[in-house]
Image (cartoon, rainbow, N blue to C red):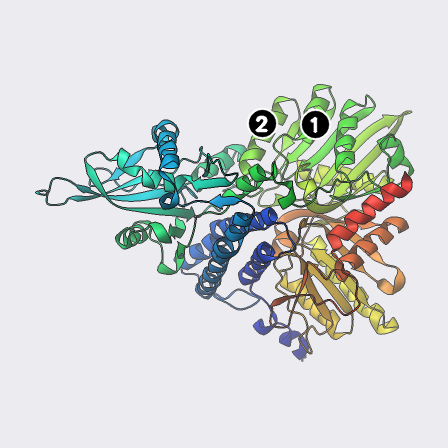
Amino acid sequence: MKTIDKSAIKLQSPLYYNNRELSWLAFNERVLEESLDERNPLLERLKFLAIFSSNLDEFFMVRVAGLKDQVKAGFNKPENKAGMTPKQQLNQIAKKTHNLVQLQYEAYNKVLLEKLKEENIEMIKMEDIPSDQLNQLEEYFDEQIFPVLTPMAVDAYRPFPMLLNKSLNLAIVIEDNDEFLENRFKTAIVQVPAVLDRYVSLHTSNGKMQFVLLEEIISHFIYKLFKGYKIVSVSIFRITRNADMTIHEEGARDLLKEIEKELKKRKWGAAVRLEIQKDYFDENILRYLTEELEVHEKDVYEIDGPIDLTILFGFYKDMAKTREDLIFQTLIPQPPRDIASDEDIFEKISEQDIFLHHPYESFEPVIEFVTEAAEDPDVLAIKQTLYRVSGDSPVIEALKRAAEKGKQVTVLVELKARFDEENNVQWAKELEKSGCHVIYGMTYLKTHSKITLVVRRKNNKIERFVHLGTGNYNDQTAKIYTDMGLITSKRKFGIDATNFFNYLSGYTEKPDFHHLSVAPFDIRKDFIKLIEEEINFHKRFGNGRIISKMNSLTDKVVITKLYEASNAGVKIDLIVRGTCCLRPGIKGVSENIRVRSIVGRFLEHSRIYFFHHNGEGKTFLSSADLMTRNMEKRVEILFPIYDGKIKMRINTILESALSDNVKAREQDEFGIYHYVERKQDEPVVDSQLLLFSKAYQVMEDEE
């Protein structure tokens, strides 16, 4: 008779898990907290409000939209961790999000606008503008705005228009002057042009910088579009639509065309959120919009200020040009410790592994690695995966140049990289035109791996150089995301890279790799094995320790195994920036686990996994978070670090994150995050600034 493991059943209880969506909202709340942190410069605080809004837009377009699709399909099964049905999740999301949006606008109106005034920067309401400036604005409206506006009447012959996702619109109620008409009231929609700046600068003589919002100018002068009618009301609103793409890969003969087709549909998905500005709306219009868009009452957000604070990205960029005192001090990425600027990169890689830590160290060696390979006459082939790249990518240019020089260039462009699909379609076309062999990954899987292989023939011998990373080949995000990379010429890494690309581009079973662990499935299997080994080491030697740093932790199989390790006495530190479904500190479940999140100036993006293994210190870097999607639905790479000095550097980086008492928050047993309390006489540690100061110190010492 088979015995039932009661402890294993206990670990499955929904009480011990955070819901994924609510945990993500908790992360976005931490982003919002940064806008209230007085240690951050004023314009940076405004930028955090913009990041919060941008994050929330994507959350609604994908996560909320997906839950709504489940409800429409009649799916009522609880999710497998916290045990909440789609309807329960939507109710909790709405409740939490309404509170967060209220906090966001309290921060904007009551704190940050007042702080801006102290700096002689002012957002002005139309009613507060003096007559001479109002005349200037009217002239600006007539010449610059009016010609771009298009009033769209709504009546029996002209139905409610299909409004673009995330577009800002005005709903205008007008009254016909003919009092004998049966129905004198009519409705029209005017879209606020996205091609114009949302804030307009006023000419002042008092040294102040004053701005007024575009939608308020249009609302004030809207009567000019409806001559012969009286303006009854103007309501400012915005719709967020379902933007999750449904790609039928199996039946698609050309994935490129299928993606392009789905991109067009994204603009017109079902409405999942309606935002309407408190100062500018008519109750009748709100009811009308709710019915027309089929939006539930809980998905209506009455906004106490300008809708869509992502406009603050542009405001930040413009203001930073003249008010450098209100932004973070510029921190310049330093030359990497492992290679000097005058050294030949391929000669150096032949001598030793090169470790890179961005943005503390420059991304330039990665660009140089690809550009030098493109120019080197001895290089025969370049193979690379691309997930997200910058708009003017030097990596893309190098690959195109290499192909034009006759080298074998194979590029896997992941067309399904969410919200980068359009860019990647364009890059794929450009690369193909240059002679690159472009592949689009594997059916039903996203290729999220970060790997480049350069094959060179030197003195009649084949050499292979491999770059593996935790982040994208994007020179712009490398300045603001923390990521790590390894460049190696070790023979078996080269063989693994060759087999990996053949696996992606051809028809072959998944290879047996020497060093790489590749998802789907293998990374999870290897993690479980590593955790089990750590448990066994702890039982023998009593020194079990696991440290893991990642963006998100959601995979229940891995979480349950971490709970087992905690119950065995293994000390576990998890540094999880965003979503974390594991709850620490629960007696008999996770009392040996600490979870912390660092939200600061740079986006924590590197994935590091450390297992003590009785002093052996196994260290891995990866493109993968410990999420079910990464374990099962993506092609990911986990790779080991063997070089002793590099392992020591990575351990130091982990310890600095665990010492942070400025930007770190820790999760309690109820799933709630609190700032880490600094102990008396404990030094102040902002891990990101500490790592930058160390990078500067290394350069000074070398000089």
Label at residue 508: none
Q: Quadrant of the C terminus?
A: top right
Q: In the displayed structure, would residue 235 be above or below residue 297?
A: above
- Lateral position of residue 687 relative to residue 435, left or right: right
What x and y, as percent, mark residue 152? 28, 36
Dot 1 amino acid type: Leu
The answer to the question of whether label 2 and label 1 lie on touching residues, with beta carbons closer than 8 A, is no
Dot 2 amino acid type: Lys
668 and 320: which is toward the camera: 320
441 and 701: which is toward the camera: 701
Asked if residue 700 shows in the view, the reply is yes
Asked if residue 507 shows in the view, the reply is no
The kind of secondary structure element at disc 1 is: helix
- Across the whole image, how many numbered discs are drawn on residues? 2
How far apart are labels 2 and 1 at the CA level?
Answer: 13 Å
Q: In the displayed structure, would residue 326 be above or below residue 366?
A: below
Q: Residue at x 39, y 49 (%)?
A: 271
Q: Residue at x 36, y 52 (%)?
A: 279
Label at residue 399: 1
Label at residue 429: 2
What x and y, as percent, mark residue 129? 39, 42
Q: Residue at x 76, y 34 (%)?
A: 364
